[in-house]
Image (cartoon, helix red, strand yellow):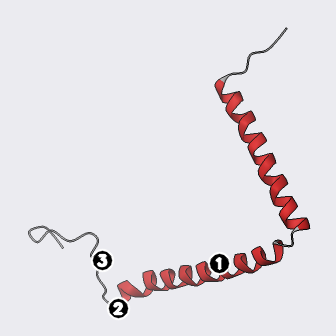
Amino acid sequence: MTAQLTSKETRMLYCAVLFFIIAAVSAFFGFFAGISAGAAVIAIALFVLFAMLSFIALVTALVGPAMGVQDHTHPRDPDGPG
């Protein structure tokens, strides 16, 4: 008795094979080509950059209303309340 694969099962099998190939290539470059050290430096730099940008966005969001900065993305209706 042979089971027929549905389109979802075929897609899932395709993704599993694709991710296996990506993992195998990544393992090759990480273990044998010495690229992992360079990738780690890039990852740390990007982490620090995005952490600083997140902190700046948080401080701006908290301090902006306290300093009277208005949100111009949603302009008020001149005839309406507010």
Q: What whole-number distance in Å separates the C-alpha atoms at marks 3 and 1?
A: 29 Å
* Quadrant in which residue 28 is drawn: bottom right
Marks 2/3: CA–CA distance: 12 Å
Distance CA(mark 1)–CA(mark 2): 31 Å
Q: Residue 44 at what x, y percent from top left? A: 72, 80
Amino acid type for the residue under numbered disc 1: Leu
- Residue 25 circle label: none
Q: Residue furthest left?
A: 79
Circles 3 and 1 in contact, beta carbons < 8 Å: no
Q: How packed is label 2: few (under 14 Cα within 10 Å), some, or many (20 or more)?
A: few
Tell me the quadrant of the picture where the C terminus can be found. bottom left
* Relative vertical location of residue 17 with respect to residue 64 in this rendering, above or below: above
Query: Residue type at mark 3?
Result: Asp
Is label 2 in a helix, a strand or a loop? loop
Coordinates of residue 36 in the picture (x, y in percent): 82, 72
Near-viewer residue (59 or 49): 49
Q: Which mark is residue 46?
A: 1
Q: Which numbered disc, 1 or 2, marks the residue that appears first in the sequence? A: 1
Q: Nearer the viewer, mark 3 or mark 1?
A: 1
Left or right for 10, reference 27: left
For discs 2 and 3, the disc positioned in front in the rendered view? 3
- Which quarter of the figure is the N terminus placed in? top right
Type of amino acid at the residue the image marks with label 2? Met
Q: Which residue lies under the disc numbered 3?
A: 71
Q: Is 12 placed above or below 70 here? A: above
Q: Quadrant of residue 51?
A: bottom right
Which of these two is toward me, 16 or 70? 16
Q: Position of residue 58 (x, y in %)?
A: 50, 81
Image spot of residue 69 (x, y percent): 31, 86
- The residue that label 2 is drawn on is 67
Instruction: Give me the residue at 82% from left, 77% from top.
Output: 37
